Image: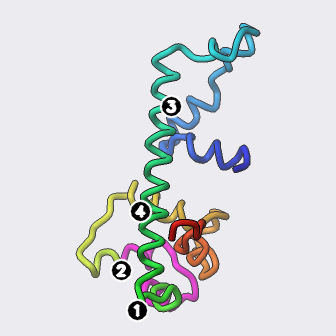
Amino acid sequence: MVYSDFCDAFRPQDPYYANLLANRSANYLLRGGSKLCYFQRPTRDAFFKCLRVHFEAEESIELLKKRLSRRPKFNVRDTFKYLDCLNQGHLSRDSLLAVLEDNLYYPTEMELNFITDRFDRNRNGKITYNDFMDELMPKNSINA
C-alpha cells in the first residue's frame, strides 16, 4: 500500500467532507508529543474500528473471489463480455448500470461509485479487461 491508497481508503466520497478534511490542520504538528496523543481516545477507537471493518470486508471479498474461482463454469472473460453489454471493449458506469438494472438490481449512486472505484484503478472511467481480471481474481492462493 502506498500513501495515495491510504488516502483513497479514508478520504470521504462527499466533496464537502473531503475538502473539510483536506483543509484541516494537523494537531500533532503543534504538540510534538507522543504518537498516542495525536488523537483523542474516541477518535482513535473510531479509527481502529474503521480499520477492523475494512479488513473484515476485504477478507470476505477475498474468500468470495476464491469460491468463485473454484466454480468450474465460471470464466472471467465471459463475465466481462456479459457486463460489456454496450460492446465498447471496456466497462463503464453506463454498462454496469444497464446490466445491474437488467438483473433487477437498482444501485444507489453511492453503490455505483463504490463498484466503479473498486475496478477503475486509474480513474479514467473505463474498466479494462485487465483491471477487471486483476480485481476479480483472488490475490492470495494460500488456503484456497
Badge 3 amino acid: Phe
Instruction: Determine the residue positioned at 23% across, 75% down.
Output: 104
Task: Say left or right for 122 vs 127.
Answer: right
Identify the residue position indicated by label 1 in the image: 73
In the image, which residues are magenta?
81-98
State how far apart marks 4 and 2 are (Cα).
12 Å
Was residue 24 drawn as part of the magenta stretch in this picture?
no
Q: Is residue 42 visible?
A: yes
SS at mark 2?
A: helix
Badge 2 amino acid: Val
Residue 86 horizontal/vertical position (percent): 46, 88
The numbered mark, 3 or 1, whose residue comes first in the sequence reads 3
Identify the residue position indicated by label 2 in the image: 99
Badge 1 amino acid: Lys
The numbered mark, 4 or 3, whose residue comes first in the sequence reads 3
Instruction: Determine the residue positioned at 63% across, 63% down.
Output: 121
State how far apart marks 2 and 1 are (Cα).
20 Å
Was residue 88 drawn as part of the magenta stretch in this picture?
yes
Badge 4 amino acid: Leu
Residue 126 horizontal/vertical position (percent): 59, 74
Residue 123 lies, with reference to residue 94, above or below; the image says above
Question: Are discs 2 and 3 less than 8 Å apart at CB?
Answer: no
Q: Nearer the viewer, residue 25 or 130?
A: 130
Question: Are discs 4 and 2 less than 8 Å apart at CB?
Answer: no
State how far apart marks 4 and 3 are (Cα).
26 Å
The numbered mark, 4 or 2, whose residue comes first in the sequence reads 2
The numbered mark, 2 or 3, whose residue comes first in the sequence reads 3
On residue 112, the disc is 4
Residue 126 lies, with reference to residue 53, above or below; the image says below
Q: Nearer the viewer, mark 4 or mark 3?
A: 3
Instruction: Determine the residue positioned at 42% across, 77% down.
Output: 68
